Amino acid sequence: MMNTSDARQIVDRLLREVSKSVIGYEQEVKLLFACLIAGGHALIEGYPGLAKTTLVKAFAKALGLSFSRVQFTPDLLPSDITGSLIFNPKIGDFEVRFGPIFANIVLADEVNRAPPKVQSALLEAMQEGQVTIGGKSYELPRPFMIIATQNPIELEGTYPLPEAQLDRFMIRIKLGYPSEDIELKIAEDIDLGNVNSINTVVSKEEIDTLQSLMRSVYVDRSITRYIVNLIRATRNTRDVKLGASPRAARYLVSWLGLGRCLMVGIT
Ligand SMILES: Nc1ncnc2c1ncn2[C@@H]1O[C@H](COP(=O)(O)OP(=O)(O)OP(=O)(O)O)[C@@H](O)[C@H]1O
Ligand SMILES: [Mg+2]
């Protein structure tokens, strides 16, 4: 049976490996990992050139998970993400061509640059864990996590995610510019920024075990009630346009279990 120190040791291994490619993102890697274990999806916001893509690639590779990346553009179609039926003249019939969504970690780069129809195909997959191609449903692989990125400055020609869609993300990570020391290292070290040397340091079994460990953490009713009250209060304050959903309450309870089993300092 895994205990919290085993869990911490897995997190340390992951951090060490990812830092071969990207530096200064320990807290972000912990948050992404916690989100993966809790079965959530993440939204990363940050200016260009902060190593967002490299961070996600290194993260997936260190975990030995399949990875795909979709660059969102105004002309993207929902089927470019989910997949489509193509006619195969050899067999004289249609066959399924699975889209890039069929991966453990899907990087949806610049998610706000594609129109709502495409965004909703993505968000549907996030919630349902399955997609429909040509009228038939297909299960997505497990674990399954969307990491979407969004550039905070580009407003022209973009389609900001509506509040209802933001609700489907478990966490939002805002990346800032690095400290001077770190920026100096990035500028000097030419090995940073590529993921070629990243090895798989966490096994699928370890991920599975952490997921069941998280589910088994006892959360007292008094704490759950506190969380529910907190969530309900967000709907009754004039400072908040749209309050948090029951799903948000569920997410917070999961976070709590995670804090205990991963010791990632989630507050
Ligand atoms: N914290 C960091 N650690 C290591 N390398 C970094 C870091 N920040 C920036 N870089 C460097 O910046 C380059 C760009 O990285 P990357 O393409 O991942 O950025 P991005 O945020 O995805 O950019 P864009 O917004 O244009 O997609 C990399 O080659 C990397 O060397
Ligand atoms: Mg990028």
Image: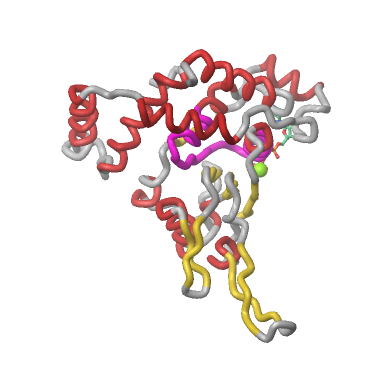
- Please say whether residue 55 is one of the residues in the magenta stretch: yes
| Direction from residue 56 to residue 27 in the image, left or right | left
Identified at 52% across, 38% down, the residue is 45
Q: Which residues are magenta?
A: 31-58
For the question of whether residue 179 can be seen, the reply is yes
The percent coordinates of residue 69 (x first, y second) are 64, 50
Foreground of the two, 227 or 157: 227
* Residue 264 visible to the viewer: no
In percent of the image, x 58 and y 46: which residue is there?
A: 104
**Residue 85 placed where, x, y %?**
60, 75
Q: Decide which of 210, 27 is in the foreground and name it.
A: 210
Specify whether 263 is left or right of 55: left
Residue at the spot 81% in from the left edge and 23% down from the top edge: 189
Q: How is the image coloured?
A: secondary structure
Q: Is residue 218 left or right of residue 9?
A: left
From what the image shows, is residue 10 above or below residue 229? above
The answer to which image quadrant residue 253 occupies is: top left
Q: Name the spot of residue 117 as percent of width and height, x first.
A: 46, 65
Q: Say above or below: 118 vs 263.
A: below
Of the pair 218 and 132, the residue shown nearer to us:
218
